[in-house]
Image: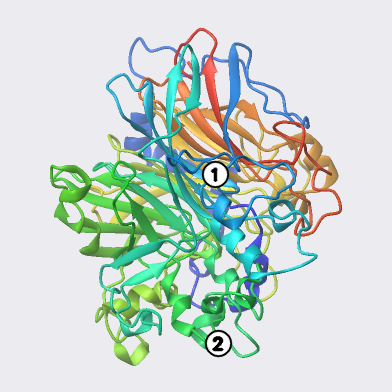
């Protein structure tokens, strides 16, 4: 996530108990100090499984790089990083490939055929056996109107709203490795853009629900668009899952939002002013349109004629993304985090097994199953609490008329169940062999503030400006309802004098973990999204620009692999099948420390990547000798 929208939500917190109210003070000391006694007790059996096998050398074969404040992408000696697909490049639809205009003069219709703004989650889909040709599916999270339009917000119009909507969503592009360099293939029959006005089907228990119906869609089964798409996952049946994250801030709520709207942080006026020219984003006039975003969407990148789907069985949330594990009997388990302060971690267990035959054979797989929310207990155990209508407090008497309403009001249902309120759960990574799941908790400066939840075992630092990575192992299979958990690392500088900024990192320091990827060799890749508003000047100088690091889970060492340009976020990571090419995204280079909606100079902070208007972009990284990344 790029913009710190969570600060707008602090007045909307519910009062369900947090585990700090029942946790032992000594337990919190253990968490602050690292693994401590828990290594030798309940977690010893599974932590031992992390060790490298006999005869294996170290996983990290590159020399770590220094922090950087340069307006450039820096990689280790022996590696090269090249820009592949920046904002504004035509995606490759045949006969419709408008050229990028440096003056931001592209029209809304042209933007709908070009790479969107602020690239985020990304995945690679091979088109041949060698993996040298494939598709990249990627999210475009949000826009900076000062960059998107030639005069920023000095004027405002329906055309500008349309262009901003066209710069959101998802891109699918074709790429090919030729003579040692990756390039876009254009035209391509696979090339597609999904924007804020692309039709999406609605499936699952909330499809057709009364709360999903609008005047434009009386059936409640077709939604125009997806927006604020953040992280992503790739399913075993070959589709792409994308999370709709901070969707609530696109709506105008007026002076008197209802209780449901308040719980989701609806503001008087939307952050992007869409409601001024697209009335469906005026929640006063169309209150149910507000319920039609916040879902995990599923896209089939291999079928350019397919209709994307909003999967309501996975719950409505500020979804960072969605990641899939598979049970021993072949059912899908989808994990997701809600990137907002004091919100939740979920998992969905499908009723049915994954069928052979790819996307078409599994078109309804994610429509049937059980959604759970996580509770992390102070003794290192945890429970998955089912969000099922009629069970416990999830009844009509408490505002949940049916299962559709439970899913539409997933936050309220999780409040009622007493799930653990987390420090902004972002990306997850899954180790299928050990049943280990990792989740970044990027930061939460409101933890412990007045009238806000205090520290607890899983979220142990007040005014948490640095973040942490939590991990757990499921008891039994991935569909288990209990777990054991601890922290992989508390981010921050171990030498920092401020308690909330101290970490226990073994190796290179970093702040605000965000993106995660576990590669085929077992290396855990960590990406960061730290902001100047969270740290003092000295801390910023020590941390430097946002970065990507590699963690050897056998010994806990973390080594810096990449640093990005000024004021960017490093996000999204995908490997080509041979492990010799890594695709990442550089988001919002040069972002203003305050607000870049209408800057006097759009190049004030950065001119990456080409020396002019800053552009988010996909970057591909390779070793000069062609070997595996990180080895």
Image position of 15 (left or right of 321): right
Location of residue 416 by image quarter = bottom left
Which residue carries the number 2 mark? 284
Location of residue 39 by image quarter = top left
Residue drawn at point x = 27 percent, y = 41 percent = 238
The residue closer to the viewer here, 148 or 204, is 148
Instruction: State whether residue 395 is above or below residue 403.
Output: below
Q: Residue 256 carries which label?
A: none
The residue closer to the viewer here, 226 or 411, is 226
- State the CA–CA distance, disc 2 to disc 1: 33 Å
Give x and y (percent) for residue 31: 54, 49
Q: Which mark is residue 115?
A: 1
Give x and y (percent) for residue 467: 61, 49
Image position of 68 (left or right of 336): right
The answer to whether residue 270 is visible is yes
Q: Nearer the viewer, mark 2 or mark 1?
A: 1
């Amino acid at each position: 996530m790029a913009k710190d929208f969570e600060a707008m939500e602090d007045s909307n917190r519910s009062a369900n108990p947090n585990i700090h109210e029942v946790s032992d003070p000594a337990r919190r000391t253990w968490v602050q100090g690292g693994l401590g006694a828990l290594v030798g007790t309940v977690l010893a059996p599974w932590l031992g499984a992390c060790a490298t096998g006999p005869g294996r050398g170290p996983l990290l074969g590159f020399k770590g790089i220094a922090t950087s404040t340069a307006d450039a992408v820096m990689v280790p000696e022996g590696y090269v990083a090249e820009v592949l697909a920046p904002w504004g490049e035509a995606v490759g639809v045949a006969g419709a490939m408008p050229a990028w205009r440096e003056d931001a003069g592209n029209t809304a219709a042209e933007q709908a055929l070009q790479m969107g703004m602020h690239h985020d989650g990304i995945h690679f889909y091979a088109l041949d056996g060698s993996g040298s040709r494939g598709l990249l599916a990627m999210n475009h999270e949000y826009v900076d109107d000062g960059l998107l339009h030639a005069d920023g917000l000095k004027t405002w119009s329906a055309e500008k709203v349309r262009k901003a909507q066209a710069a959101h969503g998802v891109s699918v592009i074709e790429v090919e490795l030729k003579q040692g360099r990756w390039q876009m293939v254009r035209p391509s029959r696979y090339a597609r853009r999904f924007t804020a006005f692309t039709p999406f089907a609605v499936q699952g228990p909330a499809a057709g629900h009364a709360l999903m119906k609008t005047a434009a869609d009386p059936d409640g089964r077709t939604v125009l668009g997806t927006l604020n798409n953040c992280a992503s996952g790739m399913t075993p049946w070959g589709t792409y899952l994308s999370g709709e994250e901070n969707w609530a801030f696109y709506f105008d709520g007026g002076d008197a939002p209802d209780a449901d709207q308040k719980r989701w942080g609806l503001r008087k006026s939307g952050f992007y002013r869409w409601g001024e020219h697209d009335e469906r984003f005026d929640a006063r006039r169309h209150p149910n349109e507000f319920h039609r975003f916040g879902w995990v969407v599923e896209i089939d990148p291999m079928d350019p004629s397919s209709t994307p789907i909003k999967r309501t069985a996975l719950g409505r949330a500020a979804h960072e993304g969605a990641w899939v594990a598979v049970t021993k009997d072949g059912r899908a388990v989808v994990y997701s985090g809600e990137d907002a302060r004091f919100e939740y971690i979920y998992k969905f267990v499908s009723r049915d097994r994954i069928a052979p035959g790819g996307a078409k054979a599994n078109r309804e797989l994610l429509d049937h199953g059980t959604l759970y929310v996580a509770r992390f207990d102070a003794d290192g155990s945890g429970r998955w609490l089912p969000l099922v209508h009629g069970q416990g407090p999830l009844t009509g008497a408490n505002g949940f008329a049916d299962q559709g309403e439970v899913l539409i009001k997933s936050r309220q249902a999780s409040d009622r169940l007493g799930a653990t309120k987390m420090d902004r759960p972002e990306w997850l990574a899954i180790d299928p062999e050990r049943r280990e799941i990792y989740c970044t908790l990027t930061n939460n400066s409101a933890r412990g503030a007045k009238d806000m939840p205090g520290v607890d075992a899983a979220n142990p630092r007040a005014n948490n400006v640095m973040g942490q990575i939590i991990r757990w192992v499921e008891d039994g299979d991935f569909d288990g309802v209990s777990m054991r958990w601890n922290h992989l690392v508390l981010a921050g500088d171990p030498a920092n004098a401020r308690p909330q900024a101290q970490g226990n990192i073994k190796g290179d320091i970093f702040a605000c973990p965000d993106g995660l990827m576990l590669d085929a060799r077992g290396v855990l890749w960590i990406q960061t999204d730290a902001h100047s508003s969270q740290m003092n000047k000295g801390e910023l100088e020590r941390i430097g620009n946002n970065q990507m690091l590699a963690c050897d889970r056998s010994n806990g060492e973390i080594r810096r692999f990449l640093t990005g340009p000024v004021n960017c976020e490093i996000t999204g990571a995908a490997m080509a099948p041979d492990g010799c090419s890594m695709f990442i995204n550089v988001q919002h280079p040069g972002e203003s420390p305050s607000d870049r909606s209408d800057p006097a100079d759009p190049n004030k902070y950065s001119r990456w990547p080409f020396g002019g208007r800053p552009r988010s972009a996909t970057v591909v990284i390779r070793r000069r000798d062609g070997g595996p990344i990180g080895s």
